[in-house]
Image: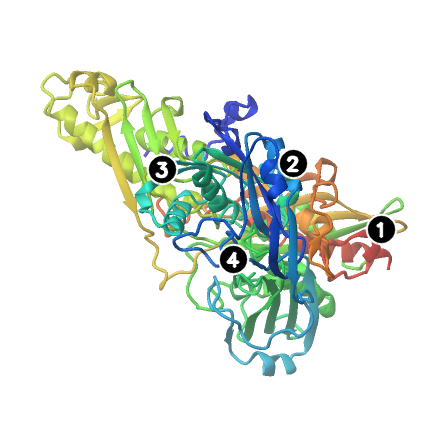
């Protein structure tokens, strides 16, 4: 493998397409005879649809169909986790309860406004804190909700220093620039979907099941995503509804969610209520950790925000108890949102660690170092690779942490209070099976293909870069294709694992294609390398040459031209190589933050962020940097801005728009200094890349909260830290 290209800051190969508007997102496809669908949504949180009067809507101009629970086609195997008009039940406010299809979008909206709905309401469960469950309800989507070792209660009681606090985080909603969008079209019993999804192959299987057709009859295409962040990881109601509508009107149907419709039917980060107890010796050695989490889900699905899971990986401690309990509410189903569980869990744990540092009159960084975990604290297995110590040291030095005065309210800049805070960041190193195809084409270009996705991360560029590197060819001569279920299958693009999962398949496919190419050359009497043993051949700049005499060789395109202009293909499916019984694979980082707080008015501004990460090998320095920064910016949102305001009388969301649901904007984002240690984790995969997408949001919320305490002496344990909480 030519080392040159891996790690280089190659610009996005699809950058030009994106900035010129030529990149086609799902909603931008057009088809002859395309019809438009809009959703009708419930206005009550719980009960059933008693009747829907659709007469007027059906007579409105351009209307093709009005689908309701009373007339919607029955699915072969409806999914209980989403509502698809298969019954009249209402589980949350804003639930899809009908679809109007018309010739134009405006006609569909107008007609939808004419539908009169009558409900029978039942009492809604909307009080999160009323009666936390003591048992674990149902099954869930994560590893065991509870895990303990040692004697956490006894050790906590006996601890010389203690912190015991409750930390809460609010419901948050995903706000990718691109809302969910689906175009469905049928050809007999074959379904084609252009859909904004992070999981084309998962969607293919799931839609095939719902409609009772073979997997092979479903074709899902998702070429570009304007952000995914987890909400586009599963199939939500609007996808089968669009397909049902397309079947009903026998035309292609487009269904695009409006921004307010992103708040309810397509997931959210649930609310968390986290009890954290830390016990330590006077020297700062952790003796006990308890992290008990209460979090909401819906009545449709037991989604678990696994906030206590990262606590099992962070610090060396012999007595640990982690627990999760779900509270079912009449809200939309929560789901994965960037660093699910980890973002909220590291906030609570890392603020508690800061509180312990103050309890012990110890530097917060020294406290982390004193409890450094050399092996996985739960399994006692070694890590595939861990360089967190270097992250702490480098970040602290860059930040100037040594100059910090530990005393709260001790640092000022004019009238502004200054605060310095830090936290540990972490995210699991995941990897799943994946496949890829690499083709030498008669036109002299190389094609790399995999059914993965570019959720904004830069996967087109990563595929290009790894192929170019493996085949020692200019990236300009490589084309990448992804986001189509006719391509070799790849996993969901989530969990920061696409690069770790897909690049080993690309490498192996490229090697296979190269071997096939060398065999063809060595067996072709007209080739200058005829008769050469294939292990004596190499590729250089698109030429097959002899190792011993580099002047002897030919362009691969010339070889293909003589051989019927046929492509030479390598196809590979690879499974993870790391042994889960031998290793724990986890990324880490250290984040240091400076904030200013106006003591009179309360607003917090993040002035400086320095973070250093250990995520294994970084395949593209430029794209990696953007991922880290994106995560940190979301950490600023977690700490200071994002908050879904639910009217708890009726379960309606009061700020379901980007004007009132605050996310960080340019003025909220300071200079962010990120570095990666860049030590390959070759126990996880040959390139040694562990993934970058999510770790930046972890720890950052806590680092900001800790900086706010350092600035003000006020500990806010309820996110987001808005000015009112600092003035109260
Ligand atoms: Mo992510 S929340 O794993 O798409």
Residue, disc 4: 87
Residue position for label 1 = 602
Sequence-wise first label, 3 or 4: 4
Q: Pointer 2: what residue?
A: 110
> CA gap, disc 3 to disc 4?
38 Å
Q: CA distance from mark 3 to mark 1?
A: 50 Å
At x 82%, y 52%, the residue is 723
Kindly check if marks 2 and 4 are in contact, taking CB atoms under 8 A apart as contact: no
Residue at 58% x, 50% y: name it. Answer: 96
Q: Residue at x 44, y 31 (%)?
A: 461
Residue under circle 3? 450
Nearest to the observer: residue 458 or residue 361: 458
Q: Residues within 10 Å of mark 2 (few under 14, many from 20)?
A: some
Mark 1 to mark 2 CA distance (whole Å): 45 Å
Q: Quadrant of residue 340?
A: bottom right
Residue 507 x, y percent position in the rendering = 32, 38
Tell me the SS state at disc 4: loop
Mark 1 / mark 2, whichever is N-terminal: 2
Mark 3 within 8 Å of ligand 1, using the beta carbon: no
**Of tags 3 and 2, which is closer to the observer?**
2
Q: Is residue 204 above or below residue 59?
A: below
Sequence-wise, which precedes: disc 3 or disc 2? 2
- Residue 334 sits above or below residue 204 on the image: below
Front residue of 441/508: it is 441
The relative height of residue 463 versus residue 683 in the rendered view (above or below) is: above
Residue 370 picture location, percent across and down: 59, 65
Front-most of 495 and 392? 495
> How was this image coloured?
rainbow
Q: How many marks?
A: 4
Query: Is 451 in front, or is 546?
Result: 451
Q: Are marks 1 and 2 in contact (CB under 8 Å)?
A: no
């Amino acid at each position: 493998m030519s080392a040159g290209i891996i790690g280089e800051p190659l610009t996005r190969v699809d950058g030009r397409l994106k900035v010129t508007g030529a990149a086609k997102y799902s909603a931008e496809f057009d088809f002859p005879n395309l019809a438009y669908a809009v959703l009708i949504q419930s206005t009550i949180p719980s009960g059933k649809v008693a009747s829907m009067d659709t007469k007027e809507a059906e007579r409105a101009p351009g209307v093709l169909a009005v689908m309701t629970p009373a007339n919607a086609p029955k699915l072969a195997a409806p999914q209980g986790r989403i509502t698809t008009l298969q019954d009249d039940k209402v589980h949350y406010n804003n639930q899809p309860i009908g679809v109007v299809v018309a010739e134009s979008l405006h006609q569909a909206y107008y007609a939808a406004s004419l539908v009169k709905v009558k409900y029978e309401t039942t009492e809604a469960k909307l009080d999160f804190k009323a009666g936390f469950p003591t048992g674990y309800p149902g099954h869930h989507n994560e590893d065991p909700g509870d895990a303990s070792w040692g004697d956490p209660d006894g050790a906590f009681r006996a601890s010389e220093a203690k912190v015991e606090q409750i930390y809460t985080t609010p419901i948050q909603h995903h706000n990718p620039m691109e809302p969910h969008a689906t175009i469905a079209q049928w050809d007999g019993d074959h379904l084609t979907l252009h859909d904004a999804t992070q999981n084309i192959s998962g969607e293919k299987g799931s839609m095939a099941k719902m409609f009772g057709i073979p997997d092979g009859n479903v074709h899902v295409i998702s070429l570009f995503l304007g952000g995914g962040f987890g909400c586009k990881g599963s199939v939500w109601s609007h996808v089968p509804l669009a397909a049902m509508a397309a079947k009903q009107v026998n035309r292609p149907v487009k269904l695009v969610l409006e921004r307010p419709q992103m708040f309810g039917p397509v997931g959210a980060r649930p609310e968390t209520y986290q009890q954290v107890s830390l016990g330590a010796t006077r020297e700062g050695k952790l003796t006990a950790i308890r992290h008990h989490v209460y979090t909401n889900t819906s009545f449709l699905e037991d989604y678990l925000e696994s906030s206590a899971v990262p606590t099992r990986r962070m610090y060396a401690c012999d007595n640990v108890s982690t627990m999760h309990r779900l509270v079912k509410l009449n809200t939309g189903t929560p789901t994965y949102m960037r660093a699910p569980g980890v973002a909220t869990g590291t906030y609570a744990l890392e603020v508690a660690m800061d509180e312990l540092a103050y309890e012990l009159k110890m530097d917060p960084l020294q406290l982390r170092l004193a409890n450094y975990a050399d092996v996985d604290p739960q399994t006692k297995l070694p890590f595939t690779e861990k360089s967190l110590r270097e992250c702490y040291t480098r970040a602290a030095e860059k930040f100037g942490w040594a100059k910090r005065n530990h005393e709260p309210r001790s640092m000022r800049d004019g009238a502004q209070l200054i605060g310095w805070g830090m936290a540990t960041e972490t995210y699991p190193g995941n990897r799943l099976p994946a496949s890829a195809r690499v083709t030498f084409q008669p036109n002299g270009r190389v094609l790399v293909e995999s059914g993965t996705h570019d959720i904004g991360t830069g996967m087109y560029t990563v595929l290009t870069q790894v192929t170019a590197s493996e085949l020692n060819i200019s990236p300009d001569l490589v084309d990448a294709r992804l986001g189509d279920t006719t391509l070799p299958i790849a996993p969901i693009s989530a969990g920061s694992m696409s690069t770790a999962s897909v690049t080993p398949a690309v490498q192996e496919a490229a090697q296979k294609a190269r071997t096939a190419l060398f065999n063809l050359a060595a067996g072709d009497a007209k080739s200058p390398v005829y008769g050469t043993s294939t292990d004596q051949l190499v590729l250089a700049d698109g030429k097959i040459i002899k190792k011993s005499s580099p002047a002897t060789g030919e362009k691969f395109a010339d070889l293909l031209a003589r051989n019927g202009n046929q492509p030479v293909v390598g196809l590979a499916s690879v499974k993870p190589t790391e042994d889960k019984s031998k290793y724990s694979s986890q990324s880490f980082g250290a984040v240091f933050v400076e904030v200013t707080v106006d003591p009179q008015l309360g607003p917090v501004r993040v002035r400086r962020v320095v973070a250093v990460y250990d995520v294994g090998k970084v395949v593209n320095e430029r794209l990696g940097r953007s991922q880290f920064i994106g995560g940190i910016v979301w950490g600023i949102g977690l700490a200071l801005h994002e908050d879904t305001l639910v009217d708890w009388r009726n379960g309606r969301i009061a700020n379901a728009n980007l004007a009132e649901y605050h996310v960080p904007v340019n003025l909220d984002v300071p200079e962010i200094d990120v570095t990666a240690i860049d030590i390959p984790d070759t126990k996880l995969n040959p390139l040694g890349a562990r993934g970058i997408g999510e770790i930046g949001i972890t720890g950052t919320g806590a680092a900001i909260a800790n900086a706010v305490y350092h600035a003000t002496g006020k500990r806010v344990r309820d996110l987001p830290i808005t000015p009112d909480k600092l003035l109260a």
